[in-house]
Amino acid sequence: MENCENIKDILSFIVSLQRNSLCPSDNCEGCTRPFLGPNSLISFNTRPIQFICCQGTTLWTLPYTLNGTTGTSSTFRVENVEGCCATFRILAPAEEGSTCPYVLTNSYFTIDTDCILALQCLGDTCAS
């Protein structure tokens, strides 16, 4: 149960950061702007994560399908946390030359955070 609380707290914090980083259409200027820099072309909206489940010693990977192409990813975006369960979205690598390094797929999964042995946060970035 202790692992659940630690992982759950970290994931809940990440969800809060991601939700607050999104810019409401009527409030993207001035001091309340949710990004740093001269423009919003590259606005961070995701803290990608990877993790190892209790059953193994390798990164958790899952398949996805995006625009008719199937792939496998070990990089995810936490979308919601309820109790000890967390819902993630699978991130796919973006095409070369894209502004954002990841694409948000429509593939989700939910996992009991007690099943997460180790969690690694990657650098904040954008996903489209």
Image (tube, rainbow, N blue to C red):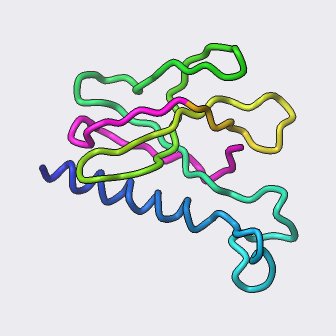
x 28%, y 45%: residue: 85
x 48%, y 42%: residue: 49
Against 77, residue 55 (above or below) is: above
x 55%, y 62%: residue: 19
Which segment is the magenta one? 107-128
- Percent across and percent down for residue 53 are 29, 30
- Percent across and percent down for residue 17 are 52, 64
Q: State the image quarter where residue 30 is shown.
A: bottom right
x 61%, y 32%: residue: 105
Q: Nearer the viewer, residue 55 or 89?
A: 89
Residue 110 sits inside the magenta stretch: yes
Does 60 sit left or right of 77 as displayed? Answer: left
Residue 54 sits inside the magenta stretch: no
Q: Which of 121 and 46 is in front in this view?
A: 46
Does 64 sit left or right of 110 as displayed? Answer: right
- Percent across and percent down for residue 58 are 37, 23
Does 105 sit left or right of 74 as displayed? Answer: right
Q: State the image quarter where residue 48 is shown.
A: top right
**Quadrant location of the C terminus?**
top right
- Percent across and percent down for residue 41 are 84, 57
* Number of disc labels: 0
Does 3 sit left or right of 96 as displayed? Answer: left
Residue farthest toward the left in the current orientation of the protein: 1
Residue farthest toward the bottom in the current orientation of the protein: 31
